[in-house]
């Protein structure tokens, strides 16, 4: 398989050969595809164009078009059934779109990649319901999520290096769970599980984090802490947050996208969006 | 470094240490008391007992194999008996070829049942089974390849839970029906039996029986150590992660299907080896071993002993089979009810099996002391 992939890579028509591109030309034309690297040279990390998905005639996504910039923190709001979770499913490869385009950076076609390939490419996802490994300790949860060679044999013989241990401790500090490090994750509170899951995303070292409802079940203090955490992550990572809690969204977002019936209804700052008559109609009725 | 790996998987594994120590003791004690203690002594262990214990140990190894896929990976295989039986058949074919011209019909080229069916020559798939190494290779390859193909198709299509269980059940049932047919060339209904010797040693002699016992116990130890190595590795943690939250494991970048397949194949190979050790000791292999009931009993052993402990599964296999030997002799009509009852009791009251019960008792004791 590997040699086949290499052959395909070699025969791509949309690029010049590496040896020509790098040696003969003083600068590069177009985009040299570097396998496993996200190309954000145009400043956009995620392209979603005209995405449509339907389940038994119900259009979960309807010509959805949206762009996420590199390093941006974007909030997505919308009533139930607006297609938020379906959109995340499409980005992470769980659901295939009926039509439309989903690109990660300039070069990666998400609609052709499988879940684990997308994860390796650098998209991390937090589920709506916090999902951690209940029988593993916090430490093991983070260890499993850590960016590493995740094929079967390397995993069998893998040992933690001191450097990896440092990284785990670093993330533990960010999510503030140092004290519980050797307790099983099932004993954590709901909010702590949410943080652990965010920590697991960080261990993957993703370019883009998709965070689905991070503050459900959290107290106000926890919420503030989460807002701080997400703001801290933006910049190094691009973060897309789906959330219902308007106060929370207001506290973190520069730019908000409102989804309605599977497509983008409005986009802009929180104030612009809240004063948009169409948004008011959707949220408050006639 | 090597030593630290060794230490790693015996740390926090008191049960495993006891388990290996018991096996080691059995290896020394049982053959000694069988071969060196005179038959009229009270300490003499009869050859019948040696063989019976050997049989239990084969089941223990099979239970360890199932525990790997069920206890750790969450794949409830109701067809693991199929891999056991296939390993057994591969060994049986070797033993058949060793009979040579000592069969009832005295045909040097064909096993008795083929002569009986008027076959003129050996079918192609019997070639090579007169060589021990080839037969042993098949003991590993046949169950391994079947598990690989079956698992690859099933896991790739994301068949999980009860549907997968039903499919494994169908697999073993289909194999049973196929092996019942005379045309298959595996002795049909009667299976393969009337074995004479293995590697030139008489199968009926006490020394061979003891040697087989020792080899079996050694393989159970090996299976335990391999299993323990796997479950304490990072791969073991991934596999448990897949059991507990498959989607999460997938989205943090593990190709879940590959991990399931790997464990499933390893487990099938261990089951095949257990079957191969089983056949020379009981002296027969027939399609009954494919029976779905066997595979279900196997699940009961593991549940009784305690899932996801390996040694618990082995212990469960020995205990339940001891009970079976006892009850089927003393009160044959209640055995199946007892087995069913046992399963219900364990599921409701002892979800972690006997090992879980033991741990709970010890915990409450240590809590009560200070």
Image: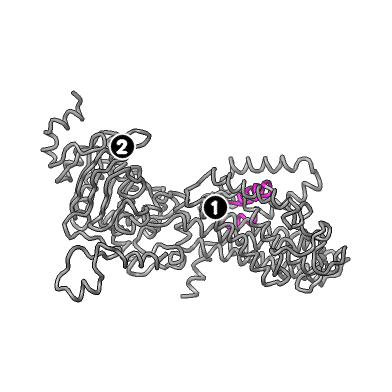
Please give left or right for residue A196 compared with residue B317 in the image.
Answer: left
Identify which residue is drawn at 69% across, 65% down.
B216
Please give left or right for residue B19 compared with residue A14 in the image.
Answer: right
- Give the mark toward the camera: 1 or 2: 2
Q: Are marks 1 and 2 in contact (CB under 8 Å)?
A: no
Towards the viewer: B243 or B306: B243
Q: Is B199 in the magenta?
A: no
Is the magenta region chiefly helix, strand or loop?
helix
**Res A60 label:** 2
Identify which residue is drawn at 32% across, 57% down.
A178
Mark 1 surroundings: few (<14), some (14-19) or many (≥20) residues within 10 A: many
**Res B71 label:** 1
Which residues are the magenta region?
Answer: B292-316
Identify which residue is drawn at 68% across, 68% down.
B135
Towards the viewer: B299 or B334: B299
> Residue A186's x, y, as percent?
41, 48
Q: Is residue A35 above or below residue A134?
A: below
């Amino acid at each position: 398989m590997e040699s086949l992939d290499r052959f395909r890579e070699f025969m791509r028509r949309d690029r010049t050969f590496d040896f020509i591109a790098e040696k003969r030309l003083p600068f590069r034309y177009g985009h040299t595809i570097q396998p496993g690297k996200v190309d954000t040279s145009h400043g956009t990390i995620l392209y979603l164009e005209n995405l449509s998905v339907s389940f038994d005639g119900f259009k979960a996504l309807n010509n959805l078009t949206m762009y996420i910039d590199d390093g941006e923190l974007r909030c997505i709001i919308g009533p139930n059934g607006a297609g938020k979770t379906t959109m995340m499913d499409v980005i992470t490869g769980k659901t295939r779109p009926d039509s439309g385009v989903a690109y990660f950076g300039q070069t990666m076609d998400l609609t052709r990649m499988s879940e684990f390939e997308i994860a390796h490419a650098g998209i991390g996802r937090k589920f709506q319901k916090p999902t951690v490994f209940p029988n593993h300790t916090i430490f093991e949860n983070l260890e499993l999520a850590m960016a590493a060679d995740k094929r079967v044999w390397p995993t069998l013989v893998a040992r933690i290096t001191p450097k990896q241990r440092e990284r785990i401790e670093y993330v533990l500090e960010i999510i503030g769970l140092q004290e519980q490090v050797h307790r099983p994750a099932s004993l954590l509170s709901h909010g702590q599980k949410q943080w652990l899951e965010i920590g697991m995303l960080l261990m993957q070292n993703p370019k883009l984090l998709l965070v689905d409802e991070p503050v459900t079940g959290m107290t106000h203090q926890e919420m503030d802490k989460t807002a701080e955490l997400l703001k801290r992550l933006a910049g190094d990572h691009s973060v897309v947050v789906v959330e219902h809690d308007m106060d929370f969204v207001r506290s973190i977002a520069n730019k908000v996208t409102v989804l309605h019936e599977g497509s983008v209804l409005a986009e802009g700052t929180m104030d612009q969006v809240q004063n948009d008559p169409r948004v008011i109609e959707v949220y408050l009725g006639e | 470094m090597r030593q630290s790996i060794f230490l790693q998987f015996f740390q926090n594994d008191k049960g495993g240490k006891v388990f290996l120590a018991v096996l080691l003791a059995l290896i020394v004690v049982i053959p000694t008391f069988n071969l060196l203690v005179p038959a009229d002594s009270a300490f003499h262990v009869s050859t019948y007992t040696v063989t019976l214990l050997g049989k239990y140990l084969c089941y223990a190894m099979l239970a360890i194999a199932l525990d790997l896929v069920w206890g750790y990976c969450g794949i409830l295989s109701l067809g693991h008996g199929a891999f056991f039986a296939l390993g057994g058949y591969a060994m049986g074919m070797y033993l058949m070829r060793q009979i040579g011209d000592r069969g009832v019909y005295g045909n040097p080229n064909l096993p008795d049942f083929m002569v009986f069916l008027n076959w003129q020559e050996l079918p192609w798939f019997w070639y090579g089974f007169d060589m021990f190494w080839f037969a042993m290779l098949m003991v590993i390859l046949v169950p391994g390849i079947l598990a690989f193909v079956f698992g690859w198709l099933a896991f790739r299509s994301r068949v999980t839970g009860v549907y997968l269980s039903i499919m494994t059940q169908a697999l073993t049932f289909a194999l049973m029906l196929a092996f019942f047919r005379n045309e298959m060339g595996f002795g049909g209904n009667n299976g393969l039996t009337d074995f004479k010797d293995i590697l030139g040693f008489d199968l009926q002699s006490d020394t061979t029986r003891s040697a087989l016992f020792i080899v079996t116990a050694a393989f159970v130890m090996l299976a335990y150590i391999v299993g323990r190595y796997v479950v304490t590795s990072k791969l073991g943690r991934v596999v448990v992660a897949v059991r507990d939250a498959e989607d999460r494991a997938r989205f943090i970048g593990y190709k879940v299907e590959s991990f399931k397949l790997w464990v499933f194949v390893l487990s099938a190979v261990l089951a095949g080896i257990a079957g191969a050790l089983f056949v020379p000791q009981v002296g027969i292999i027939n399609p009954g071993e494919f029976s779905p009931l066997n595979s279900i009993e196997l699940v009961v052993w593991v549940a009784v002993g305690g899932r996801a402990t390996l040694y618990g599964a082995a212990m469960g296999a020995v205990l339940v089979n001891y009970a079976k030997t006892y009850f089927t002799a003393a009160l044959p009509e209640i055995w199946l009810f007892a087995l069913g009852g046992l399963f219900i009791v364990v599921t409701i009251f002892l979800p972690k099996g006997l090992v879980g019960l033991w741990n709970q008792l010890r915990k409450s004791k240590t809590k009560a002391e200070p």
